[in-house]
Image (cartoon, coloured by chain):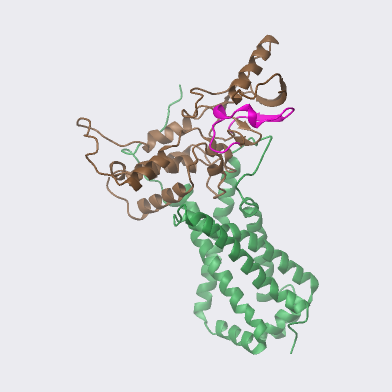
Amino acid sequence: MNLTLYVWRQKNADDKGRMETYAAKNISTHMSFLEMLDVVNEDLIEQGIEPIAFDHDCREGICGMCSLVVNGRPHGPEKATTICQLHMRHFKEGDKIYIEPWRAKAFAVVKDLVVDRSALDRIMAAGGFVSVNTGGVPDGNSIPISKVDADTAMDAAACIGCGACVASCKNASAMLFVAAKVSQFASLPQGKVEASRRVRAMIDQMDVEGFGNCTNFQECEAACPKEISIKFIAKMNREYLKSSVAPSKG
Amino acid sequence: MDTIQVSTMSSHRPVTAYKSSIGMKLLMGITGFTFIGFVTGHMIGNLQVFLGPEKLNAYAHTLQSLGALLWIIRLSLFTFFAVHIFFGIKLWLENKASRPIPYVKEVNVESTFSSRIMIWSGLAMFSFVVYHLLHFTLIVTNPEYAVLKENLDVYSMMVVGFSNYWISAVYVVAMIFLSLHVNHAVFSMFQTFGLTNAKWIPLLRRIGNLYAILILVGYVSMPIAVLLNIITLH
C-alpha cells in the first residue's frame, strides 16, 4: 500500500514549523501506524533527511505516550484506540494522511510531533494523590468498598493521561483529564477525605496552565482512547460546587 | 532550569470561585437559566395574541400594574444579561487563546453546530434584544406606535409591527438564532450544574432539541400569523 503523508515538521520550540509531504511506500496492512512511521523514517534517513520525531513508549495502548492527530482526530479515526494500536488496515491505497501534533497553548511543541505535556503532571502534583503521611501499608480490603463505587473509580482511573481530550477540544480544555483524576479519588473512601481541597487545587492548576474552558462540546469523550465519559465532568462540577459552598476541613 | 510552580493541597490558597473556569461557567448557567425562564414566560404571555386583543391587552395591563416589581424584574434581567454577555465573551476569548496554532485538518466528531456557534448566536441575540427594545418598548425605530403604546394596545402594535415584511424577517431570523442558542444551552446548563449522569446526558440533549423547536415554533407563529392575515386588526 502506498500513501501520501502531510507531516508537521518543526526543528524546536522556537521554529515556526510547516507541513511537509512524504511518500510512504510498500506499507503492509499489518503494521501499526507507528511502525508505518518507522518505515518512513528509515527511508528519510537513507535520503539524508532528519527523521520525523514522535512520542511513543509501550506501543500497546496503556502508557499514554503516543500523541498524533491523524486527519484532524487525536489517535486517528478508530474508537477507543491509541495511535500505536491503530493498524494500517484501516487505511487504503492512495490515502492522504495529515499528521499533526496535539495543539494547545499549554502543550508547547518540543520537536515535530512531540509536545511537552508536563502541564498535566503539574495538575497531578497539585492534588492528584492521597496523602498518607505515616504508618505502614494498610491491610488490603480493610475498608469495604461497594462494587458500584469501585467500578466508577476504575472507569475514571482508566485515563492514561495522554491528553487526547485537550487535543480534540475546540477550546483545548483539560476538563476530561482533570475530571477523571478528581472522580477516581472522590469515588473512594480513601480519596474522599481530601476531596474538597483536591478539586480546588487541581482546577486552580488547570487554569494556571492556560487550558481552555469547557463548552460541553463532547469532542473529548469521542477522542478518548479509554472512552472516559463526560459524566465525570459533571461529577467534578458537583465536587467543585460542594467545595465552594461547604468546604470540608480535610 | 525553570522553577515549577505548583500549589499543592497542603499549601493551597483558594482562589475566588468566580475567577475559576468552573466558577465562570456556573455564572453562565445560573444567568442562562433565568433567561430560559424569561424566554418561556415571554412566549406564553405573547401567544395570547391568538386569543384576541382583550386577552393580550389585559395581560399587558397586568404587567404594567406590577409597578416597582416590574422594575425589579427588569433590572435583574438587565444585570444578568450583562453578566452573561461579559463572561460569555471572556470565556470565548480565553478559549480562543488556548489554541494559538489551529489544526491544518480540522474535523468535528461529536460537537453540534449549535454548540460551536454559541458566541455568534449569543451576539445575534444581544443585537436583537437592543433592536427589540428600541422597536416595541422604547418605540424609537417606529415612533408611529406612540398612540398605541400610550393606550397599551399591545395587540395592535404587534399586528402593525409584523405586517411589515422586513420587521417580520428580522424577528424570524433572530428566533432561529435563539433556537440554536437554547438548543445547546439546556444540556450545557445541566452539565455545568453537575446535574447529569450517563443516562441523563443523551436525554437532556433531546430535551434541548425539543425545547429549541418549541421556542422557534411558538415565537415564529406570531409574525407568520400576522403575515397570513390569521391575526388582523379589530
Which of B60 and B209 lies nearest the eye of the viewer? B209
Residue A48's place in the image compared with B73, above or below, is above
Chain identifier for the green-coloured part of the image: B
The colour chain A appears in is brown
Residue A82 shown in magenta: yes
Q: Residue furthest right?
A: B165
At x 48%, y 43%, the residue is: A175
Q: Judge whether residue B26 can be spotted in this image.
A: no
Quadrant of residue B54 within the rendered picture: bottom right
At x 38%, y 50%, the residue is: A239
Residue B119 location (% of width, % of height): 63, 53
Which of A70 and B19 lies nearest the eye of the viewer? A70
Q: Judge whether residue A88 can be spotted in this image.
A: yes
Q: Quadrant of the C terminus of chain A?
A: top left
At x 59%, y 76%, the residue is: B44
Find the magenta span and give its range.
Answer: A78-102
How many marks do you count on the picture? 0
Residue A214 shown in magenta: no
